[in-house]
Image: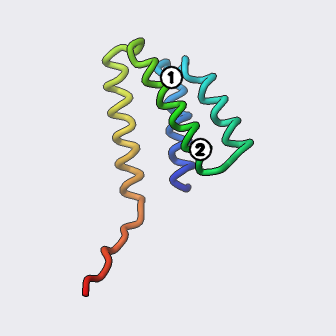
Amino acid sequence: MSLLTDLFDAQLAVLESDVAKDLLPTIQKSVNSIAANPTVLNVLAQADLIAVSARAELPKVAQDEIQSLATWVNNKLQQLAAKAPTVAPPAQS
């Protein structure tokens, strides 16, 4: 699985919880936009739109849900980092 696939998989898993139910229309619109225009700039713009929408929803979410989500995301990011190839530093002359 690629990094992008893993990130979208994580995004979909979040949607299965009650935390993100209000974000579903925004995420669906963003995914449709990405499908229609799969450029890097559009992907970044849509990710920013989702992030802004998520920040707007945060006050509505209970603190324990936020903690649970943060723990889950951190675990997923650690798993992704463990899979990432290491890059050797450039040789110095």
Q: Is residue 60 above or below residue 49?
A: above
Q: Position of residue 88 (x, y in %)?
A: 33, 74
29 on left or right of 70: right
Sequence-earlier tag: 2 or 1:
1
- Front residue of 60 and 5: 60
**Closer to the camera in the image, 38 or 77:** 38
Q: Amino acid at mark 2?
A: Val
Location of the N terminus (image quadrant)? bottom right
Q: Measured along the vertical axis of the image, is residue 44 above or below residue 69? A: below
Amino acid type at mark 1:
Ala
Q: Name the residue rendered at 70%, 35% in the picture.
A: 32
Q: In the image, residue 49 lies at what x, y percent?
A: 54, 31
The residue identified by callout 2 is: 43
- In what element is the residue under mark 2? helix
Residue 20, numbered circle? 1
| Left or right, residue 64 beside residue 29 | left
Rendered residue at 35%/23% (across/down)? 66
How far, Cα to Cα, is label 2 from label 1?
20 Å
Q: Residue at x 54, y 43 (%)?
A: 44
Locate the C terminus by quadrant: bottom left
For the residue carrying disc 1, how many other residues have a C-alpha within 10 Å: few (<14), some (14-19), or many (20+)?
some
Mark 2: few/some/many CA within 10 Å (<14, 14-19, 20+): some
The residue lying toward the viewer, choosing from 46 and 61, is 46
